[in-house]
Image: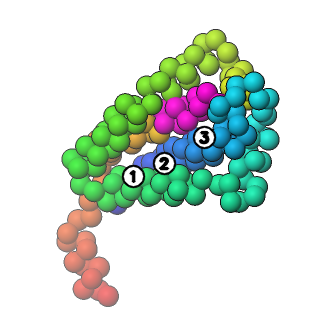
Amino acid sequence: MFKPVIRIVAFSIIVVGTFALTLGAILFQAASVTKAASDYTVSVTWPSALTSVVWPPSGLPFHLLFGVAILAGFTGLIFFRAPRAIGVGVLFFQAGTGYLLGGGLGGFFICREFAQYHFGMDAERLGEYWFAFESIAVWSLAAATLAVLRIFARKLQVAEGQTNEETSAA
């Protein structure tokens, strides 16, 4: 078991990364539902894009959301249960794969927003799929952060004598 602070931090990182991927999956679907993926002149607002995917529920990208849930569960399992060497390797592999599959481009978009636009990207750019790359970049950063945290996090060692005393007393 890890210290409670490490567990809370790791769980929070996984939740933030999962939220980013979920939002990316929903907005990816919204780009095709609202036709903004093929026609950049379509005026789309964030509420209309989200509403077009969330209601009716048949528009939800269940396969993408299921994939996000599996990835989050797998990441949690690897962080909390796998041996350190395997966990760190798999987490860095996730981060590297995410970076190669669009996270690098998403990181560029995020830095560009900070530097130039100050998050002023309007929803008319929804069809350009920037948000999908940005969500992959956030997940890559989360996986790399978890890997570094896993390197330095020590599991609590319970003294063997103490566990024997507790079991004999019971």
Predominant secondary structure in magenta? Answer: helix
Q: Nearer the viewer, residue 134 or 169?
A: 134
Marks 1,2: beta carbons within 8 A: yes
Task: Give the mark, 1 or 2, whose residue is nearer the N terminus.
Answer: 2
Question: Which percent across, then down, holds residue 7?
Answer: 44, 53
Residue under label 2, please give it.
Answer: 14
Quarter of the rendering occupied by the C terminus: bottom left
Task: Classify residue 146 by image quadrant.
Answer: top left
For the residues labelled 3 and 1, the Cα–Cα distance comes to 22 Å
Residue 64: % across, % down: 53, 52
Q: Which residues are magenta?
A: 127-137
Q: Quadrant of residue 101?
A: top left
Q: Residue furthest bottom?
A: 170
Can residue 132 be seen in this snapshot?
Answer: yes
Amino acid type of the residue that numbered disc 1 sits on in the rendered structure: Thr
Q: Secondary structure at mark 3?
A: helix
Q: Callout 2 environment at 10 Å: few (<14), some (14 to 19), or many (20+)?
A: many
Q: Is residue 50 left or right of residue 142?
A: right
| Image vertical order of residue 121 relative to residue 49, above or below | above
Label of residue 28 in the image: 3
| Point 54% across, 31% down: residue | 134
Secondary structure beneath dot 2 equals: helix
Secondary element at image label 1 = helix
Image point (31%, 39%), residue name: 92
> Split into 4 quadrants, where in the image is the N terminus?
bottom left
The residue pinned by badge 1 equals: 75
Residue type at tag 3: Phe
| Residue neighbourhood size for the residue with mark 3, other residues' Cα within 10 Å, grouped as few (<14), some (14–19), many (≥20) | many
Left or right: residue 37 versus residue 6 is right
Does label 3 or label 1 sit earlier along the sequence?
Answer: 3
Evaluate whether residue 156 shows in this view: no
